[in-house]
Image: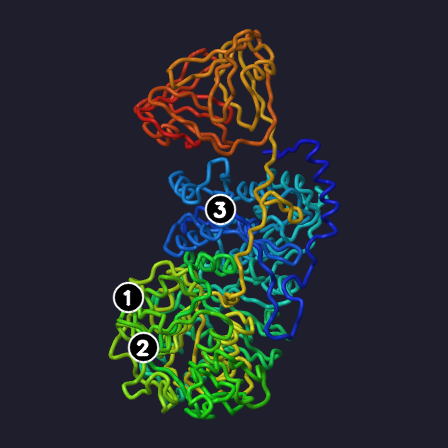
Amino acid sequence: MKYMKNTHIKLLSLFLFAILLFSYLPEGKLLQDKKGAWPPSHIKAKFLPRVNIVHLEDTDTDTEYNFLASIPMTVFHYNGTVYQSLLIPDIVSMPIEYIMEDWKTYLDEWGGVKHINFIGDVPEYKKIQFKNFYNLEWENVTNITGNSFEIADSIAIHDWENSSRAIIAPYKQTLSDDDVESISNAAVIASLYNAPLLFTSPSLLGQNTTDVLEELGVNSVVMVEIGDVINDTVDNQLASLGIAVEASLTTENAIVSYIMNLTNQSMLCAIIYNWQNLPASLYGARYGGYVLFLPDSIALLSNNVEEILKNLKMSNKKLTEPYELPDEVRYGEQTIANDFYNWLNGLGGNDPDDLEIVVTFNTATYYDPSNGFSVTFERALNGDPSDLTANGAITGRMPLNFTGNIALVNRGGTYRATIFANPRPNHTTLCMNAYEVQHTVNAGSPVVDSWGTNHIVNEIFGWPYRGWCAENNYFPWQDIFNNTPNLSPILPPGPGDGADCDPSIFASFIGKGYEAHFHSGAYAGTGSHPAQPDVPNIGFVADVENGSTYLYFSCHGGGTGIAIREYDNGIAQDYSGEAWGSPYWPDDDGRTYDGSAGGYYSQTDLDNDLGNTHSLLIGYNACSMANGEMNEVLLEHGGIMSIGSYTSVSFTGSGWWWNLFTYLITHENYSFGEAATYATARTAPLYAPNTGQRGTDSSLYYVCYGDPMVKFVKPEWTPPEPEMLNVFYGGHKPDGFTVSITFNFSLSKGWNLITLPVEHNYTASSLYADIPGCNIILRWNASIADFDLYVPGTPNDFAIENGKGYLIGIENENGTFFNITGMPIENVSVLLYEGWNMLGWFREEQTTADSLLNSIQGCNIILRWNASIADFDLYAPGVPNNFVIKRGDGFLVAVTEQSIWHGEG
């Protein structure tokens, strides 16, 4: 259709466009303002109180297009800030359900969700469920339907007042890998530019789309079309509209270069299968990454390395001496890194000044044996923060199916807001049953730090400022409360700086103001521990249920479960451990080896016990915890990150790894991925930098499952107030602009049954006055089963209501014409009484009598007034007269029960 606006809106648009042209997003350097610095800078996020819900069917690639077109309306960059709302499919799995809950809980503190956009063919019953869940009325709901071209066009008009730029990608019914990359990266670029994404057939730009380009005032486009598939006809159409093609990205190299120039970073959102491009594109839009398929050879090599590892007899118990992995494993990891960087260099994706960021969207092999991809890939790429110019990356794995990963990307992107759905956002839980508590310099085996020596690894105390001495009775509990150990030096070279400079898990939490509770077992025991006399031994399951943001396990493992106590006794110790408060508590030999009391907790137990964990992080300081489903179970239950190793781990090296990680996310504001990258570089072998650095603990192969870009909640954080809808962010006005339309009626002599399909303020008397030749207006009053009549001189002047039909009497021999201009009606709420009701079809797309009859509860007859014969057309089951009902048509329905009609049909 031809989109139109009122003259005063048109003039306002031109004025605003002239102003906004000078404040539009810069051409490059959007997300980072410093290069070669560690840790990297992150863009600020703000949140909009709305939900966009897209109908998805993985057998229908049109729905894939619809989701991608929705990304730039949901996530967009403007003036150095990224704005985000919720974008989810209408397929409600557990991860989707839990992010919906947390988004609602966050926004309920600020008046709730303000608007829902349904995109595509979302079933009516699901619309009602979503609407009711978010406590919205139909007037705060928008339905955007049609084919993929029409949906993209409608999104552009719905959400943008004007835009100097648009992004165009080719539409195809059958998608090649090149096509998937084109449309996925087009969505990313549109979000980075805060511009709409539109689609074209390779041979011709549709009339609707050209109308949209004109309406928005577009003067340039970026075309994303690997293989140069859009032909010259489209270029000529654009030229005839005065629209320049500022870039035509026809290769992977061109896309990578273009996005890197915009973002000042190199972030790969890697996929192996179609449909995972949807969460990958959403992630790229949020953080500034390009979406590409990984080469099959790298995927195969990674899985082969995992098969070698499976044949090794790894220990389920923590190692006192880390072992060397076989040469074929080390060679395999090195080959993965070399092959990956050769491929990335060929695309121009290697950042000469910084570590790359590589986030992979695919299931892992233990979770999905058929289509899984080994996490040996991520570990092989780990970079070295002390040498940013060398090969190496910050990595993360999004390990769920594509709808689960969509939920996970939403959770990561909104973490700064949705973490406040957690009942205790500053609470942490420590479940430690086999852990390191050294009190002697360089104790344990081997020396823990490949960047230096002079360290103490103690997961409770770290290395306090006085150490263990007579002044503190060789029990520095109070010392870590008075003066928390920090980390020095943070970056090499140099040895450790001694006392007060080695952090720990517990002390890091205490020193920053978190609440940290010890719970050594899954379920409630009796009493409490002397270390925390006010903390009942309720078990970690109940503690997490009450609200926790970090659950730390330090214990023996095995992939599909962990060795912990069944019943909580607070802080687990060996039977020969020291009593609370005695020198060198909890163990004078520097290690609690087996405080599990023979207990075991499986991934099935975890799945059964967890509900919505509200963005919980789990850290597994345990053996082989990437060799099962423990990590995925957490993420399915609303977790944000789970970290496990696919090899056996050692007491000393692994304890130091986790002390570093926890300190960095709590004290130094590192993201999860940055902290994990740093900790691995200080303790374990690296392969991507190719520096020959072996690391001191060859047993550590930790992998991040979840969003590596998230920064852990801080005690000083407060819930961010959501931004406003219906205000300008550049030319973008989310949910605040609807195009007015002019609707023309051709009315015959005699009776005409119509509805007004646009917003208006008519009463019967004012409508009567505006229709030439009108001599009577009737409305059906279903509550009394009779007509209300209006003619001049009668007192019965009634309101003309949305969604209802009215009989208009015309006395002119040749009929008459009447037009009305206004914003299209998007939703109605009409009470249907048992018996006859007179309704009106207000939607742009036409419907049929059969569709109406099957959509309206208890309906058994549909009547349409046929002015040409001055009689009704009837449709009922078994009657073949299935007539069409168009926008502006009124109709009668007979129903057997009372209900509410919202425009279904």
Say few, some or many: other residues with alpha carbon within 10 Å of mark 3 (under 14 / 14 to 19 / 20 or more).
Answer: some
> Does residue 297 appear anywhere in the picture?
yes
Image quadrant for the C terminus?
Answer: top left
Instruction: Tell me the residue at 72%/43% (across/down).
Output: 16
Query: Which residue is tagged 1?
Result: 604
159 left or right of 506 in image: right
For badge 3, the amino acid type reads Gly
Looking at the rendered structure, the number of numbered marks drawn on it comes to 3
Q: Is residue 821 positioned above or below 197 on the image?
A: above
The numbered mark, 3 or 2, whose residue comes first in the sequence reads: 3
Q: Is residue 292 left or right of residue 423?
A: right
- Residue at x 51%, y 82% (from the top left corner): 485
Residue 387's spot in the image, x, y percent? Answer: 60, 81
Q: Mark 2 = which residue?
A: 558
Residue at far front of view: 471
Q: Amino acid at mark 1?
A: Thr
Secondary structure, mark 1, is helix
Left/right placement of residue 28 relative to residue 630 reads right
Name the quadrant of the N terminus: top right
Label 3 vs label 1, nearer the camera: 3
Q: CA distance from mark 3 to mark 1?
A: 35 Å
- Of 738 and 64, which appears nearest the observer? 738
Q: Earlier in the sequence, mark 1 or mark 2?
A: 2
Whole-percent x, y for residue 139 in the image: 50, 35
Percent across and percent down for residue 473 are 42, 89
What scheme was used to colour the molecule? rainbow
**Residue sitting nearer the eye, 711 or 147:** 711
Quarter holding residue 443:
bottom left
Say which of 782 and 464 sits in front: 464
Query: In the rendered structure, which disc, 3 or 1, sits on the residue that comes first in sequence?
Result: 3
Expressed as whole percent of the image width and height from the top left, the position of residue 129 reads: 39, 42
